[in-house]
């Protein structure tokens, strides 16, 4: 391991000494040392399952270390649960927000910290303090709005306000930009720098190495539960960090076809004047028309909330169109001719959903059970109406080994896996069925750089077998690297189309804002 990075001239906010944690046979953390200077932004990177979230969960009191010590501001502390962490001045913003959707921002911030039996008095004091914090740290949020009505960026700011309201001087952020638009991510970094300037210490867990280079002062690299390097960010590079994470060099690849598809290649998907109006009367999709040919990847770009999620749900059979129709693997679907997800799977249409926790798996199920969701009635998994659990576990283990899901234990609960390993399990499940049409939403959200390479190779492998692939991603680098063609959606419509080989970020950014047609708009 390289020597510790320069922790600056100030005192340490955090010092971890010899932290170890085991889950059964899995050693999640092995004798980890870490020093973070007060008032700095420190990045922690590593592959999925490297032990990043476990380490931070120990610091926040969700887990207890098997051995080791935690020092906060130079003092040895015992953190048995999150209340101990909060008392020590530690706050955490989780990858999946811990908010009550039916509560307002103010109610969420006060929850568990009311501090006064006269709630109206507490609410008035909390409102005043929230306004002060919002102004000081540039955390604009509508305190009386229901969380369910807020965009994702404001929900995240609510989580940060909740931590600051509890007097957090150390803030842990776990994959904070995984669900944010580029604009929301930029605003988050403005907030983080404002926090840093006022002395708050920030630990940033992210797979996005460009973010590490842009916003952190120091960075530590975990690999397979061990700390392998501490670096000053200014002295490293994305390529060095990537190599330290995976233990080998990663090559930049261009996945575009050498030759274009023949003009007469059949369509796997054909969408004609497709429209969707939701229960409130809002048009989510408007007169959408496009096709995806067999052996082609069509990328869908756009700022989140412009109809991409609705499109995936309609094409996968989760909801029906209101107008127009589409033909998918030879089957026409419309409001008059609906279809359900089970029938889609029979048509060899597989779907990797954008939200893996809501639509991809069940957290309380074992990995083996999640690995057959949607396919549990298949003959190979049933014997006279009873699930063949040993067969399911064996099949799950093969899936795990094929896509490097860690740990490769079919008996672990789905919730016990990191987000990236959950994603790999879902992708492995759907690709196992050899789809003829593949619908993929955010395939590498929360996935480390080594796993991204593997997932991209699997998607390209399916394309080269003749699969028609619709790819929705907020990662423009991913869209430009994989897609043969790219369509851009804005307010439920296709506003532009570009050849994947010719696309660039500036051009796509203008299209996503619909500014390429009317610069004054």
Image (cartoon, rainbow, N blue to C red):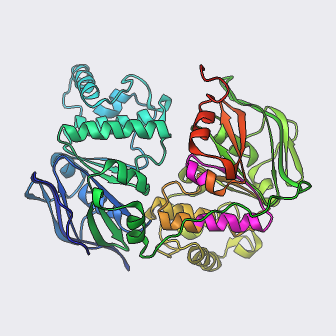
- Vertical order, 491 against 479 (above or below): above
- Vertical order, 102 against 220 (above or below): above
Residue drawn at (92%, 55%), measured in percent from left and top? Answer: 264
Residue drawn at (52%, 62%), measured in percent from left and top? Answer: 422
Locate the N terminus and report the quarter of the image it occupies: bottom left
Q: Position of residue 256 (x, y in %)?
A: 69, 60
Q: Position of residue 277 (x, y in %)?
A: 72, 28
Query: Magenta stretch?
Result: 455-479
Q: Quadrant of residue 347?
A: bottom right
Q: Quadrant of residue 240?
A: bottom left
Locate the C terminus and report the quarter of the image it occupies: top right
Residue drawn at (29%, 57%), measured in percent from left and top? Answer: 233
In depth, the one of 126 and 132 nearer the eye is 132
State left or right for residue 172 relative to residue 275.
Answer: left
State left or right for residue 171 relative to residue 436.
Answer: left
Q: In the image, is residue 463 part of the stretch drawn in magenta?
A: yes
Q: Is residue 62 visible?
A: no
State left or right for residue 147 relative to residue 430.
Answer: left
- Vertical order, 369 against 402 (above or below): above
- Vertical order, 250 against 85 (above or below): below
Q: In the image, is residue 346 part of the stretch drawn in magenta?
A: no
């Amino acid at each position: 391991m390289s020597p510790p990075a320069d922790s600056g001239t100030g005192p340490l906010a955090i010092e971890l000494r010899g932290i170890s944690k085991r889950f059964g046979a899995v050693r999640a953390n092995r004798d980890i040392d870490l020093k973070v200077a007060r008032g700095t932004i420190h990045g922690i990177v590593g592959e999925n399952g490297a032990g990043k979230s476990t380490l931070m969960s120990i610091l926040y009191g969700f887990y207890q270390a098997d051995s080791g010590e935690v020092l906060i501001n130079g003092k040895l502390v015992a953190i048995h649960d999150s209340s101990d962490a909060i008392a020590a001045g530690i706050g955490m913003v989780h990858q999946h927000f811990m908010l009550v959707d039916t509560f307002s921002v103010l109610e969420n911030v006060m929850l568990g910290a009311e501090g006064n039996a006269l709630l109206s008095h507490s609410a008035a004091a909390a409102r005043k303090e929230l306004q002060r914090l919002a102004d000081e740290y540039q955390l604009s949020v509508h305190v009386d709005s229901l969380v369910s009505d807020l965009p994702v960026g404001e929900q995240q700011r609510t989580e940060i306000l909740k931590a600051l309201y509890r007097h957090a001087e150390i803030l842990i952020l776990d994959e904070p930009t995984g669900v944010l638009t580029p604009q929301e991510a930029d605003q988050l970094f403005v907030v983080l720098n404002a926090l840093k300037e006022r002395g708050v210490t920030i630990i940033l867990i992210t797979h996005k190495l460009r973010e590490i280079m842009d916003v952190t002062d120091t960075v530590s690299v975990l690999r397979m539960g061990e700390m392998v390097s501490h670096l000053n960010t200014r002295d490293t590079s994305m390529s060095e960090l990537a190599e330290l994470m995976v233990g080998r060099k990663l090559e930049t690849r261009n996945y575009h076809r050498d030759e274009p598809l023949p003009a007469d290649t059949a369509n796997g998907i054909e969408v004609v004047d497709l429209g969707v109006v939701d229960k409130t009367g809002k048009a989510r999709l408007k007169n959408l028309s496009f096709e995806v040919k067999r052996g082609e990847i069509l990328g869908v770009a756009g700022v989140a909330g412009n109809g991409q999620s609705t499109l995936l749900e309609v094409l996968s059979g989760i909801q029906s169109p209101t107008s127009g129709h589409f033909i998918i693997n030879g089957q026409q679907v419309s409001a008059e001719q609906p279809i359900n997800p089970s029938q889609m799977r029979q048509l060899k249409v597989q779907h990797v959903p954008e939200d893996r926790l809501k639509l991809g798996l069940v957290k309380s199920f074992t990995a083996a059970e999640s690995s057959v969701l949607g396919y549990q009635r298949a003959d190979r998994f049933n014997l006279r109406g009873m699930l063949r659990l040993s067969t399911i576990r064996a099949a799950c283990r093969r899936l795990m080994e094929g896509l490097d899901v860690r740990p490769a234990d079919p008996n672990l609960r789905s919730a016990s896996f990191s987000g990236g390993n959950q994603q790999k399990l879902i992708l492995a499940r759907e690709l196992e069925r050899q789809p003829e049409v593949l619908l993929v939403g955010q395939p590498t959200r929360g996935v480390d750089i080594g796993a991204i390479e593997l997932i991209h190779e699997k998607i390209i492998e399916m394309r080269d077998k003749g699969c028609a692939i619709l790819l929705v991603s907020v990662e423009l680098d991913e869209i430009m690297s994989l897609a043969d063609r790219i369509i851009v959606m804005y307010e439920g419509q296709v506003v532009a189309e570009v050849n994947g080989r010719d696309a660039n970020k500036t051009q796509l950014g203008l299209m996503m804002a619909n500014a390429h047609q009317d610069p004054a708009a």
